[in-house]
Image (tube, rainbow, N blue to C red):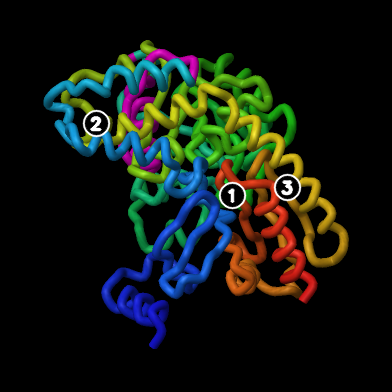
Amino acid sequence: MSATETAIASAEAHSAHNYHPLPVVVASAEGAWMTDVEGRRYLDLLAGYSALNFGHGNRRLIDAAKAQLERVTLTSRAFHHDRFADFCTRLAELCSMEMVLPMNTGAEAVETAVKTARKWGYRVKGVPDGMAKIIVASDNFHGRTTTIISFSTDPEARADYGPYTPGFEIVPYGDLTALREAMTGNTVAVLIEPIQGEAGVLVPPAGYLPGVRELTRERNVLFIADEIQSGLGRTGKTFACEHEGVVPDMYVLGKALGGGVVPVSAVVSSADILGVFKPGEHGSTFGGNPLACAVALEVIAMLRTGEYQERAAELGDHLHRELGLLSGGGAVEAVRGRGLWAGVDIAPALGTGREISERLMEERVLVKDTHGSTIRIAPPLVISKEDLDWGLDRLRTVLSS
């Protein structure tokens, strides 16, 4: 067997089959390119679902990690460390907020947001104990913990994991009337993605996010924006909410916050909201560790320049123009997205999203499918226009073959 076949066979034999990766085994990567165990190079148009916004092996991030590795990597929150205050301060400033509660993974941050909203509802809003409700959107993806899949509408995420956690109401994404009708005096939060990534990069109707902001403010309800995939430069602004001039009560961040080097996530909000916690009521051994803070501080410094947001906006305009030219010709049914992020619905007659992804892999381009015949395109923000065009040419080749 080849090195690729050997590695895949070993993984299949000894790991749970909770993912269905493309049959490529990556050995090294730099920028927007990855090299497999056979020495073949591939253009990465997925960027770790936005975890790699700044590319593979970004020198600033690697240097920050190396320097911190030589000093201290973990103290737990039993003790203070000298990177923590800076991390919390800088991230709060980036978000124009006041407080940060750091965790590790995106799902942990969403769980933290849920706990925060419920505690705020009981302690501040005065909701009766055990009655707090959080409204979410259909076709959401916020993670895969037991609580989070309890409010998923994806059968693959939910099946065989009951009994499910109560306290959530699901309304159609983009429907302000349904949201208004679902709100009661016990509603403590609305949790939505400003752009739904896993659902196929769905952008809500214009005016939806401002409408959510207005409704939540009127009803004394928290607006929680899950910007784990959409935030930190991906859409051409620091946060996707900014495209409609909206500031939520709480950001949920992850993925790119760790620069593709270490897992870093956080809930960022006001002192009035995050101030509901007292010592011992919530925590994480690795949350806010020195290594994570060192890398995240460099990510924040890079975002403060605005260059990555500007690059995502400019290249994103180019990406969507080129993808738009593919629409209407029979091969592509629809293109959605914002910035360097697109969902492309392939005509089912040409194949499933998985099949199109496999054909692109043969052309040395890596993307990933979702929901039938949709593929997602989300290259690192550092990709060159020439490389992006090369990848789009490979897509045209696959769609015309």
What stretch of residues is rendered in magenta? 95-123
Q: Secondary structure at mark 1?
A: loop
x then y, percent, for residue 34: 49, 60
Residue at 42% x, 47% y is 57
Q: Count up the numbered dots.
A: 3
Q: Which disc is residue 319 wearing?
A: 3
Q: Residues within 10 Å of mark 1 (few under 14, many from 20)?
A: many
Q: Is residue 126 above or below residue 2?
A: above
Direction left: furthest residue: 78
Q: Is residue 169 above or below residue 92?
A: below
Label 3–label 2 contact, CB within 8 A: no
x then y, percent, for residue 319: 73, 47
Position of the N terminus by quadrant? bottom left
Q: Is residue 226 above or below residue 98?
A: below
Distance in Å between CA atoms under marks 3 and 2: 37 Å
Q: Which disc is residue 379 wearing?
A: 1
Amino acid type of the residue tagged 2 in the rendering: Pro
x then y, percent, for residue 390: 70, 59
Quadrant hosting residue 69: top left
Distance in Å between CA atoms under marks 2 and 1: 28 Å
Amino acid type of the residue tagged 3 in the rendering: Leu
Mark 3 or mark 1: name the one nearer the start of the chain.
3
Q: Which residue is mark 2?
A: 290
Mark 3 or mark 2: name the one nearer the start of the chain.
2
Residue at 65% x, 60% y is 374
User: Observer-nearest residue: 264 or 99?
Assistant: 264
Direction right: furthest residue: 329
Quadrant hosting residue 107: top left
Amino acid type of the residue tagged 1 in the rendering: Pro
